Amino acid sequence: MPTHEEPVLQMQDVSMEYKGESPCLALDKVNLKIFPGELISIAGPSGSGKSTMLHMLGCLDKPTGGEIFLDGRPVSRMNDNELADARLYKIGFVAQAFNLAPTLDVFKNVELPLIIREVEAKARKKIVEKNLSVVDLSDKARSMPSQLSGGQKQRVAIARALVNEPKILLADEPTGNLDSKSGADIIRFIIDLCKSRGITVIFVTHDTKIATQTNRIIRMLDGRIESDVQNKRKEGGG
């Protein structure tokens, strides 16, 4: 990675300890730099700390030690409104469980982040239609989530994550609830988005097939980075 490039996300001695009867050190002094446009997988067994790391990178949780930087700015110095804006404008989230509102149709699910931003109705319509076209679901705009397949629901979730044009896309086990073909399609779709839009994409996965498709593989074990390697076979796509 070019040394002149500034990281879009950085973890500096980040620890996360969950208190309780049996305290758990989910992250143990993790150091990590993520650069613009990278396609990264965070892999490891259950309990290795990979989902905790993703929550930290997404500004969803605050560490109990160390510092996280978003575009060079310490996250700990951001107030609640600034954190909400970071999650709304800079970071898109795609979850394993889709997280669609069951009582809203596809169009309105994708529209939600724009309503929160108070984007004018006419502009919202244009943006939603554009992103439904990107995920090839224009014909499902008025369908309810219950009428969609798992793969279609995940594409709706991706469209919703993209409407605010985030520079970072975080995907937490995005194929966990999908069959193998739908899962492979979703991964290829997200990877193509990364390449075409220059978005930084970070997958959390336990699936080695997904990890080997990314350009950089970070393996977690017991709350620490066990290895962080460039996947040379994937450099330049392919």
Image (cartoon, rainbow, N blue to C red):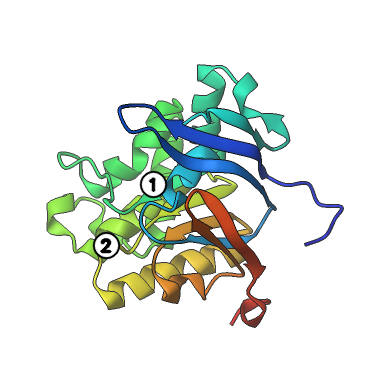
Q: Are marks 1 and 2 in contact (CB under 8 Å)?
A: no
Q: Secondary structure at mark 1?
A: helix
Residue 160: image tag: 1
Query: Is residue 9 shown above or below 41?
Result: above
Residue 96 is situated, as x and y percent measured from the top left of the image, at: 31, 54
The residue lying at 28 percent from left, 50 percent from top is: 98
Mark 1: which amino acid? Arg
Question: Where, quadrant-wise, is the C terminus in this rendering?
Answer: bottom right
> What residue is shown with label 2?
152
The residue lying at 26 percent from left, 57 percent from top is: 153
Cα distance in 3D space between marks 1 and 2: 12 Å
Estimate how packed mark 1 is, as few (under 14), some (14 to 19) or many (20 or more) residues with alpha carbons within 10 Å. many
Q: Is residue 203 left or right of residue 108?
A: right
Q: Secondary structure at mark 2?
A: helix
The quarter of the displayed image where residue 76 is located: top right
Residue 148: image tag: none
Query: Is residue 68 shown above or below 205?
Result: above
The residue lying at 70 percent from left, 30 percent from top is: 73
Q: Nearer the viewer, residue 124 or 7?
A: 7
Mark 2: which amino acid? Gln
- The reply to whether residue 164 is visible in this rendering is no
- The reply to whether residue 202 is visible in this rendering is yes
Residue extending farthest to the right is 4
Residue 72 is situated, as x and y percent measured from the top left of the image, at: 73, 35
Estimate how packed mark 2 is, as few (under 14), some (14 to 19) or many (20 or more) residues with alpha carbons within 10 Å. many
The residue lying at 38 percent from left, 30 percent from top is: 115
Residue 214 is situated, as x and y percent measured from the top left of the image, at: 55, 70
Number of disc labels = 2
